[in-house]
Amino acid sequence: MKNRKRARVLAVGLDAAEPAFVRQLIEEGALPTLKRLLEAGSWSRVASPAAIGSGTVWPTFFTGNEPSAHGIYSDWCWQPQGMSLARYDSSRLVPFWKRLADEGLKVGVLDVPFAPLVGISAGFEITEWGAHDAFDGQMNFAPGEIAELVTKKVAPHPFASADRGATGQRDVEGLKRLGAECLTGARLRGELAERLILERETDLSIIVFPEIHHAAHRLWHTVAADHPLYAGEEFENARTVSPSPADVLREVDSQIARLIEAVGDEATVMIFSLHGMKPARGLPAFLSTLLEEAGIAVRVNNWRGLSWQGRVQSFIAAIKSRLPASLKGLYHRNVPQRIAYKLAQPTMIPAYDWNQTRAFALPTDQHGWIRLNLAERESKGCVAPGRYEETCREIEEMLNSIVTEEGRPLVRGVMRTARTVEEALKGSLPDLVVHWHDAAFELPMKIKGRLLEAHPAALGQTGQHAPEGFCIWKGAANSIPETIAATELHHMLIASLA
């Protein structure tokens, strides 16, 4: 290792690694690298905005701003001017490492979720080499000098070509294949990151392992096998599928060891997760119907009332909803991502009568998201700002009152993202975030006193995001707080570069 004037810093993101599960594996001796780091350093809780949604956490980390400032909560974002959804565009966000690179530090960044490419010249930056959340549908990197290393010297990540799916818990072979792809991807990621760090001699290296996230969503039933949500007979052969999330974490632990060797034992090391995982069984998919049944959202109820664009959208949505699962899988495997997004975008929000729709549900990957049709914010808003508080309270009371036919509550709580209507008028986030009880994942689920019978979507998903993350820190800092805000993590890295 060459003599260096600057301190070196390595930050490794374990995307969606559950703190309690990681601590358990450390205590069992299954993660020797993390155990050594913890013995020489400290463990802190990371408080992130995951209660809003997992899409908020990485923009919060790399901008250092709260969600109310950066406005990102999902990979599909509501556009109030057009009363429609648009795919997330990272180009308007500026990550903290751009300033560091502009000041002459060598920065290396590999697959930080939601992060833009900013044109680093002295270090390296790569997006979507093997990402859990893909937006461009292709790998991007800078500078051009790393092209051969990225494309030829290390094998492609399995996520770049694999289906990455399984048809459900009965598809044991598909689950095994998914676990193996995550395991291989973690090994290849460590190899690529090590080569990049050594070749580019970076001062700050930020390497994220999304394989943990991907494995946990589909294989969490192997971690919490006794949870009531996994009591169905379809789980009988799937509870011990291998490789499991524990196996993926073990592989990541060994790759962290090679990255530490690449930066040197004197480097500051931060291992962090911005949110965890917990049991689920699909996604609750009844919020839109519930709002419609309550008269809060009103669909255009006749063909003539739709615009020509609305008629086309309704026709496409009707066809998609009637496709069998096998054809849906074939579609997603063979249609290019950009085209799939283009076809999906117009059908993700029903054709509402905006003059009568006071609030509506947004597409979600976990929590329920409700946006008020607020005048002076939405282009077709019908809720006067003076009635914002009243409307929020009405919806909250309705949600908190719904129970199953057996009387079990469905809603754990309803969170507001704005304290006042003035904040809401400036905001891009959903106004209300609904947190569900486990009863909302039941199949089927009937709400007492209501007509709808709900069937969760994405039943192959057995892990959902949990709110807290963690940070293992080994460095020169004298004291690390027991709880660290996600907005503060980058300040710790910058301070360590001095």
Image (cartoon, grey):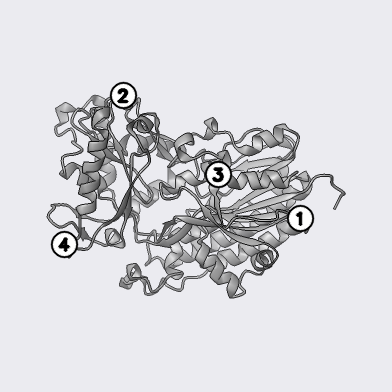
Label total for image: 4
The reply, left or right, for residue 423 in relation to residue 6 is left
Q: Is residue 81 above or below residue 466?
A: above
Q: Nearer the viewer, residue 165 or 475?
A: 475
Q: Nearer the viewer, residue 46 or 304?
A: 46
Image quarter of residue 410: bottom left
Q: Position of residue 35 (x, y in %)?
A: 65, 68
Discs 4/1, front: 4
Secondary element at tag 2: loop
Q: Amino acid at mark 4?
A: Glu
The reply, left or right, for residue 368 in relation to residue 191 is left
Name which of mark 3 and mark 2 comes first in the sequence: 2
Q: Amino acid at mark 2?
A: Glu
Q: Position of residue 176 (x, y in %)?
A: 49, 66
Q: Amino acid at mark 3?
A: Thr
| The disc label shown at residue 405, or none | 4
**Residue beneath label 1, please?**
262
Name which of mark 4 and mark 2 comes first in the sequence: 2
Residue pictured at 74% horizontal, 40% vertical: 106
